[in-house]
């Protein structure tokens, strides 16, 4: 059985993600990944009211400006979370992805997937729990129309 991180550990991760994405209370944010629910609960605890998890199917597409992904197992798991969250993010979205230090995945593979989805990596911050990558996309709808 996998143990969940301590509240303090999620606090550090979430502080990093909030700082990198410049998240405010007015923005819609969506969480995804193996530990997406922990991020969701911690954001709710901090007073973010416009936060959703990827689980509900009634969420309108292209309506979220921020995406937070916390994965731990493998590249495939994180890539799956990226593919799942992408339709819900608007054309000018910002994304933060936690890549666990114990994961058997490569940040280069994640970087390639982000670029393939129209995101540009803005920053990467190493923390005790792993690596948090921040990426943004601007005008992605223009890219979709061209393809």
Image (cartoon, rainbow, N blue to C red):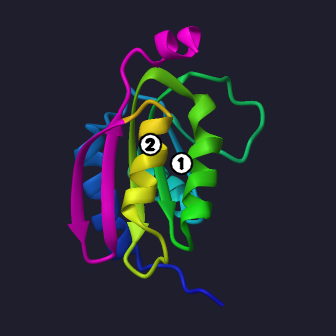
Where the N terminus falls, by quadrant?
bottom right
Q: Residue at x 24, y 54 (%)?
A: 124
Closer-to-camera residue (40/54): 54
In the rendered image, the vertical position of residue 7 relative to residue 91, given as above or below: below
Q: Is residue 128 above or below residue 25?
A: below
Res. 35 in view: yes
Residue nearer the viewer, 49 or 96: 96
Q: Residue furthest right?
A: 57
Q: How many other residues sit within 10 Å of disc 2, few (<14), some (14-19) or many (≥20)?
A: many
> Is 23 displayed left or right of 75 in the figure?
left
Q: Is residue 135 magenta?
A: yes
- Left or right: where 138 falls relative to 142: left
- Quick check: is 112 in the magenta stretch? no
| Left or right: residue 16 compared with residue 93 | left
The mark that comes first in sequence, 2 or 1, is 1
Residue that extends furthest to the bottom in the rendered view of this protein: 1
Asked which secondary structure carries label 1, the reply is strand
Q: Residue at x 34, y 74 (%)?
A: 9
Image spot of residue 70 (x, y percent): 48, 60
- SS at mark 2? helix
The disc placed on residue 31 is 1
User: Residue at 21% of width from left, 59% of height from top?
Assistant: 125
The segment highlighted magenta reads 120-147
Kindly report the distance in space between the C-alpha atoms of the residues bearing marks 2 and 1: 16 Å
In the rendered image, residue 122, in percent from the top left (x then y), is placed at: 24, 40
Residue on which disc 2 sits: 114
Position of residue 73 in the picture relative to residue 94 (left or right): right
Front residue of 5/61: it is 61
Q: Position of residue 146 (x, y in %)?
A: 54, 9
Quadrant of res 127 = bottom left
| Mark 1 crowdedness (10 Å alpha carbons): few <14, some 14-19, many ≥20 | many
- Asked if disc 2 and disc 1 are in contact, CB closer than 8 Å, the reply is no
């Amino acid at each position: 059985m996998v143990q969940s991180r301590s509240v303090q550990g999620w606090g550090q991760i979430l502080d990093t993600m909030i700082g990198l994405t410049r998240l405010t209370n007015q923005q819609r944010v969506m969480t995804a990944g193996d530990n997406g629910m922990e991020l969701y609960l911690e954001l709710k605890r901090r007073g973010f009211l416009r936060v959703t998890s990827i689980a509900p199917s009634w969420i309108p597409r292209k309506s979220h400006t921020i995406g937070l992904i916390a994965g731990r197992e493998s590249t495939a798991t994180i890539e799956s979370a990226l593919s799942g969250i992408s339709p819900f993010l608007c054309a000018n979205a910002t994304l933060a992805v936690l890549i666990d230090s114990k994961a058997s995945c490569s940040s280069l593979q994640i970087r390639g997937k982000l670029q393939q989805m129209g995101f540009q990596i803005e920053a990467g911050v190493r923390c005790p729990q792993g690596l948090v990558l921040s990426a943004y996309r601007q005008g992605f709808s223009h890219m979709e129309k061209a393809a």
